[in-house]
Image (cartoon, rainbow, N blue to C red):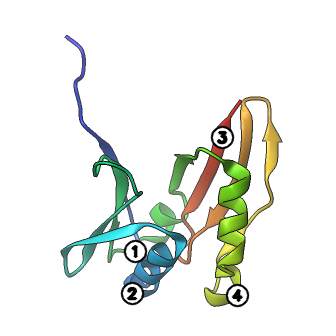
């Protein structure tokens, strides 16, 4: 028997829920409010199969060790788009690192306001 599924979604925490919601909306995700302390953020596509849940919940060791990997279609275009948003000037602790070449492809990292590490990548 094989595992049949429709989507996979992670849960991430936030130190300041309202700030993180604003950050992810500005980053380019679409927010769907689930309840007052949880939202689902999805990427734009035909269905809701790609996204993550943002919670109004913070445990430093958990959040600052959370990582999310997002494969994009055009890494350079995505990187330039994110830089134009000037998120590092608008949000304390947000960082956007330069694109790095790896043996498997290219990647750049974004650290969100709470410390979650995002990998934006494109495979060779």
20 vs 41, left or right, is right
Observer-nearest of 91 and 115: 91
Whole-number angstrom distance, CA of label 1 to CA of label 2: 13 Å
Disc 4 versus disc 1: nearer the observer = 4
Disc 1 versus disc 3: nearer the observer = 3
Which mark is drawn over residue 104? none
What residue is pinned by disc 2? 18
Whole-number angstrom distance, CA of label 3 to CA of label 4: 26 Å
Observer-nearest of 27 and 110: 27
Which mark is drawn over residue 58? 1
Label 3: few (<14), some or many (≥20) within 10 Å? some
Taking the spot 57% from the left edge, 71% from the top edge, the residue there is: 112
What residue is pinned by disc 4? 89
- Which badge, 2 or 4, is on the more N-terminal residue? 2
Q: Position of residue 100 (x, y in %)?
A: 81, 48
Taking the spot 42% from the left edge, 75% from the top edge, the residue there is: 14
Q: What element carries label 1?
A: loop
What residue is pinned by disc 3? 122
Whole-number angstrom distance, CA of label 4 to CA of label 1: 23 Å
């Amino acid at each position: 028997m094989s595992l049949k599924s429709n989507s996979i979604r992670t849960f991430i925490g936030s130190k300041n829920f309202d700030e993180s919601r604003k950050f992810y909306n500005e980053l380019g995700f679409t927010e769907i409010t689930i309840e007052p302390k949880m939202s689902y953020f999805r990427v734009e596509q035909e269905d809701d199969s790609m996204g993550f849940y943002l919670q109004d919940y913070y445990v430093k060791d958990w959040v600052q060790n959370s990582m999310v990997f997002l494969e994009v279609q055009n890494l350079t275009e995505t990187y330039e788009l994110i830089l134009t948003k000037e998120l590092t000037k608008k949000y304390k602790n947000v960082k956007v690192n330069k694109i790095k070449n790896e043996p498997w492809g290219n990647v750049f990292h974004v650290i969100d306001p709470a410390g979650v590490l995002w990998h934006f990548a494109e495979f060779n």
